[in-house]
Image (spheres, helix red, strand yellow):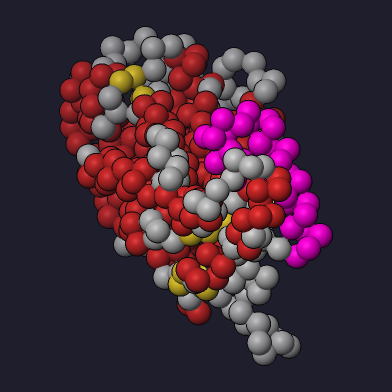
Amino acid sequence: MATKKLWGGRFQEQAAAWVDAFGASISFDQLMAEEDIEGSLAHVKMLQKTGIVPSNDCDQIIAGLEGIQKDLEAGKLTFSVENEDIHMNIESILTDRIGAVAGKLHTARSRNDQVATDFHLYLKKRLPKIIDEITTVQQTLIRLAEENVETIMPGYTHLQHAQPISYGHYLMAYYQMFKRDKERFTFNEVHTDISPLGAAALAGTTFPIDRQMTAKTLGFSQVYANSLDAVSDRDFALEFLSNSSILMMHLSRFCEELSMWVSHEFQYLELSDAYTTGSSIMPQKKNPDMAELIRGKSGRVYGHLMGLLATMKSLPLAYNKDLQEDKEGVFDTVKTLLPALKVFNGMLSTVTVKADNMKAATENDFSNATELADYLATKGVPFREAHGIVGQLVLKGIQTHQNLQDMSLGELKEASPKIEADVYNELKSEVAVERRHSEGGTGFDQVRKQIEQAKKEIES
């Protein structure tokens, strides 16, 4: 029985409909319809210029593709499982419209380099959008940090109060994380900006094609140097998923802290009603659901990275049908990242900072213990000895329910005669923060330097 498949010349039997459905990718790769048409237009214009296909035939194909392009933009196209993927669907529609001449479009091209080209184009268009959204978050962080340079909060290690820090310093820590995220996506652009078109199935083609022309037409800066590599690897997609996983990890950590900071136990922040939800049974609840959702969505992005790594790990060169599994995770990650960044920025930009609560948390927690140890060290006491002295004072404070700054000078001098009345100024949390002038530290001057540098980076 003859088959209707465009590739089916040597086949005598047709697959059952459910087998076709299993093998088809049109349910998801139709997201690349725009890119597929763009790639085909670039290819046929090259065929025309090189004389591989007669000019009048190319004119018909170009007109047909441009008509399909307009219908796509108008939402008038429908695709079928019978035509498997976006490439065969577009070619089938073109054939219906202009006849057999449509078959000349596939001269010197394979679906292998076609799909790789579409995928590169798809991601190439979306990376700048992700980078822009990260930049917006960075701008919000800079603004908040500038407003809160002298807002004091507890700094944590092991989720235990460690030393007081500037809230602005805390915010700028995340600015730096997002800066590196942006750098990773920017580098990802380099590896995405390579054209596979012209690699054909795996070995190139005997036709005198001009790969540089199609690359330039499509906006690629270079072409793949090896045809096997061009159709078989997806490291640009893996790099995207890896970068996305790291970005989502940073967002998730921030959202974890937001969820804690707004709780009754901390009360450092309050989220806008626009980014929280209530309870169906408990009227008093104000839940940080958007922060929790972003935190939760990090898992699906990690899953897409691991899924593609597992798909790729044993593939022999060159193309294998397994590579059909490369796109859904990327599509879903793009669909996850962009809204997550938008929601996160909205949530962060409308947050209310409860500065008094933050500072109060640094005054009953012995987080100034290091200040006292440093004070003794400046008086000539070896730091290890100073550490032990202050440790004993902390123990005494716990037993007597006193903070270090509440102990009398006599009590402090019992621990070390080096302690003088000037120690009380050193034990103030704002002084402890302000005095940390080391480069990159939490001192107010250093935080302001970080902010000014960040502004220059964003402007450039």
**Residue 221, percent across and down?**
28, 24
Q: In which quarter of the image is residue 389?
A: top right
Q: Is residue 194 above or below residue 152?
A: above
Q: Residue at x 27, y 45 (%)?
A: 452
Q: Which residue is drawn at 35% across and 53% down?
A: 142
Q: Position of 113 compared to 215: left or right? A: right
- Residue depicted at 61% across the width and 79% down the height: 286
What residue do we see at 44% from left, 61% from top? 151
Viewer-nearest residue: 11 or 53 = 53
Percent position (x, y) of residue 29? Answer: 51, 45
Closest to the observer, 32 or 426: 426
- Is 362 left or right of 282, judged from the image as shown? left
Q: Is residue 170 visible?
A: no
Q: Where is residue 425 in the image (x, y as percent from the top left)?
A: 48, 55
Would you say residue 373 sits in the magenta stretch? yes
Q: Nearer the viewer, residue 196 or 71?
A: 196
**Where residue 199 appears, x then y in whole percent?**
41, 18
Is residue 278 in view?
yes
Left or right: 126 with respect to 86? left
Q: Quadrant of the N terminus?
A: top right
Q: Which residue occupies the extreme right position in the image? A: 399
Q: Give the range drawn in magenta.
A: 372-401
Pick whichever, 227 or 374, lies toward us: 374
Q: Quadrant of residue 383?
A: top right
